[in-house]
Image (cartoon, helix red, strand yellow):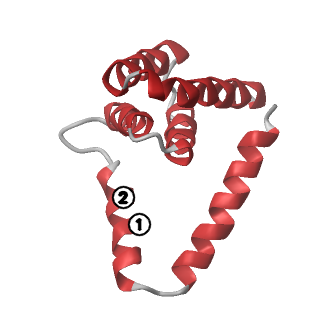
Amino acid sequence: MSDIVNEFNEYRSKMNDKILADNNKVIKRIFNLDTNAFTEGALDVKTKELLGLVASAVLRCDDCVKYHMETSHKIGLKKEEVVEALSIATLVGGTIVIPHLRRAYEFWDALEGQS
């Protein structure tokens, strides 16, 4: 099951390298802004990751959900915390979010399988 984690990370890394190699100033600034937005500030990193996860689920971005799930796992968020955030995303986003919720659960299980 952890193959989905490795496949996602390998593809993401390969394509990010390719995108950034084009040296487009706007794209590089967006990547930088994204990275810096999730650092410690008035909100702690765990809260920001949960906010990113909720927004990603509501916007139905599976890659974004996977990214925030993995980061949440790495920084020590518990499954219960992640599931509660996903429950809010499903409430706000509606039933159209349920397929993304399924994939999020599958990805979390794969992350836990790696531990």
Give the residue at x 63% y 59%. Answer: 12
Is 83 drawn above or below residue 62 in the view shown?
above
Amino acid type of the residue tagged 2 in the rendering? Asp
Q: Mark number for residue 106? A: none
The residue at the far bottom in this view is 23
How far across and how far down the image is residue 77, in percent? 48, 24
Q: What residue is pinned by disc 1?
A: 31
- Tell me where residue 82 appears, x and y as whole percent: 47, 22
Q: What residue sits 49% from the left and 40% below the top?
A: 68
In the image: residue 11, left or right of residue 47:
right
Residue 34 numbered tag: 2
Count of numbered circles in the view: 2
Q: Which residue is drawn at the image coordinates 36% and 84% (left, top)?
A: 25
Residue 84 in the figure: left or right of residue 12 = left
Separation of residues labelled 1 and 2 (CA atoms):
5 Å
**Image position of 14 (left or right of 40):** right
For mark 2, give the secondary structure: helix
x and y percentages locating residue 8 in the rendered image: 69, 50
Q: Residues within 10 Å of mark 1 (few under 14, many from 20)?
A: some
Q: Is residue 32 left or right of residue 2?
A: left
Q: Amino acid at mark 1?
A: Phe
Residue located at (42% from left, 85% from top): 24
Asked which quadrant contains residue 4, the reply is top right
Q: Nearer the viewer, residue 57 or 112?
A: 57
Between residue 45 and residue 27, name the one nearer to us. 27
